[in-house]
């Protein structure tokens, strides 16, 4: 039986890195937006904005670095 070309499409890495960028952006955006809303409701200076934006940056970086450090264990080898 001839072996199939199991080469992944070129767009796989494009979608992977686009998803990582979206995760980072979403973490930062949600932290800043949530902090601004809390500051508005509680009538505080930008303390919650600063704290939650830093938390959003950390959460976004964790999500991105997790994909680099821990490979996806659910992928199977196509050596059948």
Image (cartoon, rainbow, N blue to C red):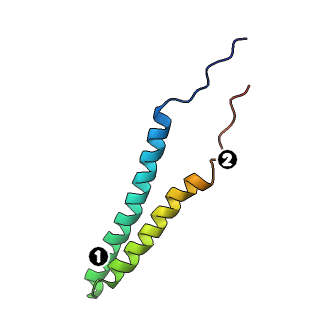
Please state if 47 lies on the left or on the right of 64 as rendered: left
Q: Residue furthest top?
A: 1
The quadrant of the picture occupied by the N terminus is top right
Asked whether the beta carbons under mark 1 and mark 2 sit within 8 Å of each other, the answer is no
The quadrant of the picture occupied by the C terminus is top right
Task: Give neighbour class at mark 2: few <14, some 14-19, many 20+ (Cα, 10 Å).
Answer: few
Considering the numbered disc 2 on the image, is that residue within a helix, a strand or a loop?
loop
Establish if 46 lies above or below 14: below
Establish if 29 lies above or below 80: below
Q: Residue at x 42, y 68 (%)?
A: 57
Residue 46: % across, % down: 29, 83
Task: Give neighbour class at mark 1: few <14, some 14-19, many 20+ (Cα, 10 Å).
Answer: many
Residue 18: % across, % down: 42, 46
Q: Residue at x 30, y 86 (%)?
A: 42
From mark 1 to mark 2, how far is it between C-alphas?
A: 38 Å
Residue 73 marker: 2
Residue 34: % across, % down: 34, 72
Q: Residue at x 65, y 40 (%)?
A: 75
Q: Residue at x 26, y 88 (%)?
A: 43
Q: How many marks?
A: 2
Please state if 77 lies on the left or on the right of 7 as rendered: right
Q: Quadrant of residue 15?
A: top left
First-in-chain label (1 vs 2): 1
Residue 11: % across, % down: 46, 34
Residue 69 marker: none
In depth, the one of 51 and 30 nearer the eye is: 51
From the image, tell me which residue sits under label 1.
Answer: 36
Establish if 4 lies above or below 66: above
Q: Quadrant of residue 74?
A: top right
Considering the numbered disc 1 on the image, is that residue within a helix, a strand or a loop?
helix
């Amino acid at each position: 039986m001839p072996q199939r070309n199991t080469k992944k499409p070129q767009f796989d890495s494009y979608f992977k890195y686009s998803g990582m960028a979206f995760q980072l952006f979403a973490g930062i955006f949600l932290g800043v937006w949530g902090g601004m809303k809390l500051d508005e409701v509680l009538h505080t200076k930008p303390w919650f904005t600063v704290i939650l934006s830093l938390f959003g940056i950390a959460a976004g970086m964790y999500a991105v670095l997790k994909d680099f450090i821990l490979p996806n264990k659910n992928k199977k080898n196509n050596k059948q």
